[in-house]
Image (spheres, rainbow, N blue to C red):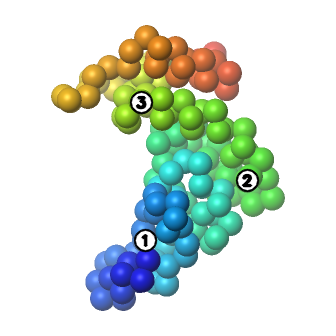
Amino acid sequence: NDLLAELAADIENVAAVKQARYEDLAPIDGLDLLAGNDDVLAKVMDMGGTGGICVASNLIGTEMRRIVDDADNRNEIEDGLRDLYKAMSVTTNPIPVKAALNLLGHRVGGLRLPLVEADEQETAAVREVLERHGLLAAA
């Protein structure tokens, strides 16, 4: 984090850091802090962060926006999404995200090797969480 602060001071257009290392999650002088993992968006916002670059936002952007905007309820909102976050890590990304988007009717294309499509078990885990959150019904 000290090096990141140094870079922010030395490089004119460095404005933010996407922090995905749990052990380094902290505000950095001169940089906006962005959550790099879905499950810490609320924590980053509580630290004064400005948002996140998160996998689940492809599916539940509105809910994640509520985490950003609703300081009083952000931890409760995030707790309700933990099962979805977990499903999005059932295998290497972007495999589960593409599977979810395809299940929701968005044709997002295939994967480049060495990645392969989600298998039946992985797809079932993704489908289950989408159903639980009422996302499939909307599709």
Question: Which label sits on residue 26?
Answer: none
x and y, in percent, of residue 108 in the image: 34, 26
Coordinates of residue 70 in the picture (x, y in percent): 74, 56
Residue highlighted by disc 3:
91
- Residue 131 lies, in percent from the top left, at 63, 18
Q: Is residue 103 above or below residue 74?
A: above
Label 1 sits on residue: 16
User: Is residue 104 visible to the viewer in this orientation of the structure?
Assistant: no
User: Disc 1 residue type?
Assistant: Ala
Q: Is residue 93 left or right of residue 27?
A: left
Separation of residues labelled 3 and 2 (CA atoms): 27 Å
Say which of marks 3 and 2 sits in front: 3
Gap between marks 3 and 1 measured at Cα: 28 Å
Residue located 50% across and 33% down the image: 88
Give the residue pinned by disc 2.
74
Relative side of 121 to 67, left or right? left
The quadrant of the rendering that contains the N terminus is bottom left
Query: Disc 3 residue type?
Result: Thr
**Are there few (<14), some (14-19), or many (20+) residues within 10 Å of tag 2?**
many
Lower sequence index among marks 1 and 2 = 1
Which residue is situated farthest in the left direction here? 113
SS at badge 3: loop
Residue name at image x 49 percent, y 79 percent: 28
Label 1 secondary element: strand
Q: Which amino acid does the dot numbered 2 rest on?
A: Arg
Answer yes or no: is residue 61 visible. yes
The image shows residue 124, relative to residue 74, as above or below, that is above
Give yes or no for contact between labels 1 and 2 (Cβ–Cβ under 8 Å): no
Q: CA distance from mark 1 to mark 2?
A: 22 Å
Q: Nearer the viewer, mark 3 or mark 1?
A: 3
